[in-house]
Structure formats: C-alpha cells, structure tokens
Image (cartoon, grey):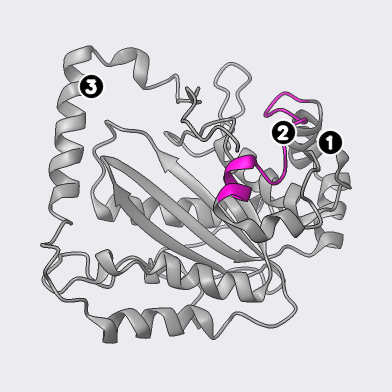
Amino acid sequence: MKNTEERPVTTYTDKEIFPRLSATDLLERAALSKARLDRWVVSESASVDEKIRQASMDIVSRHIHENKNYYLVTYTFPECFSYEYEQMEEHCFQIRNKHIQLFDINFRSKRTSLKKPEWFPRQWFFIEGKHARFHIHVLLEAIDKSVFVKHIANKDRTKHVFKRLIEDKLFKRKMKVITDEMAAVHRDYHHHQHYGKTYDQLQVDDHWLIARFLVEYIMHRNEIGNEKWGLHGVNQSPISNHSKVMNDVEALCKVEYLHKKEFYKKGSPICGQSLCYQYSDIN
C-alpha cells in the first residue's frame, strides 16, 4: 500500500507582495479572509435550494457534447489575500481574457460586452472559498490542436513560455501526468492511456500538455525579466497537478462536483453563485 501521508509542499508566491507584509499584517489579513469566508458558511441543517442548483448545472451541462475533450484548470489564491466575492469575479474576467490573449494578443473584452473570438472554446468559471483560501476552477472546451501548434510557431510570447515549459524551468518534466494522488482517488486512472507517463513523453500537441501550458502562462510573472502577462497574486504548488483533461462523461460529473451543495444552502449570501455567470459562456 502506498504511503498517503501528506508531504511538505513548496509553493510559488508573488514576490511583489509578501516581502512587504509584516507578521502582524499577515495575521490581520488571514483573520479578515476567514471572517469573510465565514459569512459563506450556513448551518449544516439548512436545506439546499435544489431548484437553483439544478438550473445552474443545466446551464453548463447543455454545452457538454459527446466525443469532445474538456480541460479543468485550477487557480489558487494564497491565504492572507482578503478578497471579496466581487474581486474573485474580477479575477475570472482577467483569467478569461488572458486565456484568449495567449492565442490572440490583440484581443480585448469589455465587462459590459463580453465576447470571444468565434473559434475560441467556451469557458465556465467556478468560485470556491474554503479554509481561508480562494480557488477559481475553469472548465473549458479543449483547444484545437492545430491552433495551438500554429501559435507556438508564430507567436514570440507563446514560443517563449512554451520553451521555458519544455526546458524544465517552470515545472519538472519528469512529473507524472497522472499523479499517485489522482490514481489513489480515482481508480479508473490506472487504465488511462497516460498512466505511468511523464510530461516529457508527451507530444507537443497533447491536450494534457496544452492544459498545463495554460496554467503556467497564467502563473508566470517575472518582474526582473519584465514578463508580467501572468495574473497578479496567484500561486500554486509545483508538485500538484492543477490541469486535467476529461471526456464528456467525466466533464458532466465534474459539473455536478463543482456545484457543491454547500454553496446552495438556503439563506447563504452566495447561494447560486458558485458558477460565475457574468464571465462564463452560458449562451
């Protein structure tokens, strides 16, 4: 039996912010974050508004099509970041735009007139606040492989980030695509075509590599090198897999999982707000 004890985790953090915060500042921010998250917590006995929850699931589920691949990428904001829900919505807007700008550097979208290039896949954003830490989960249709390869070849910025990725500068290329933790939780992964493979064994247009590339692009922020295209404040563990590829059946299961009942309790100020309607492709 594998040892499932938790191992120490090293995290990437935004060096612009944390060095300027004293121990007292960090404690105050942590307390403020916890207080804001506590407002989301409703009594365990509170009933779930299944009508709102089901309606929200249906909005996303109707866009899940057979024989398509879907990505799930997760962005985590560190403890001590005292964000309000509205600020997390703003981050959803920024991530949406940055995903598209990765392939179309001239793309701009207004909050009052949400749009995307016709060819770009749909994206759905889910906000989760838990244990004084905020997460944004993005479920999106897989990016066309030919589009990805074309932009790798023709866009200098994309080429630069991808080069850093494959040269082992952003995460370990020997990292397993299907981690031991993933396989322990989901036994079906033992039969996955990528089980036992590492990222350096993947073809350049493999969806698992493309999904990982999205995460690394959003995380990348190097002030010294003036590479500021990444999202300010986001951090991740370099040993965890924050990008996954799913088929249509897995995506539908994930839609239900992302609509956790705890976020649809009657009386909760965020009831029905797990899905960020404002910046998701719901039409």
Q: Secondary structure at mark 2?
A: loop
Residue 235 got which mark?
none
Q: Quadrant of residue 53?
A: bottom left
- The reply to whether dot 1 and dot 2 touch (C-beta < 8 Å) is no
Q: Amino acid at mark 1?
A: Asp
Q: CA distance from mark 1 to mark 3?
A: 38 Å
Label 2: which residue? 175
Earlier sequence position, callout 1 versus callout 3: 3
Depth check: give the residue in front, 77 or 67. 67
Residue 26 got which mark?
3
Q: Residue at x 15, y 66 (%)?
A: 268
Label 1: which residue? 200
The outermost residue toward the front is: 1
Mark 1, Cα crowd under 10 Å, few <14 / some 14-19 / many 20+, is some
- The reply to whether dot 3 and dot 2 touch (C-beta < 8 Å) is no
Q: Residue at x 50, y 83 (%)?
A: 283
Instruction: Identify the magenta region.
Output: 168-184
- The reply to whether dot 1 and dot 3 touch (C-beta < 8 Å) is no
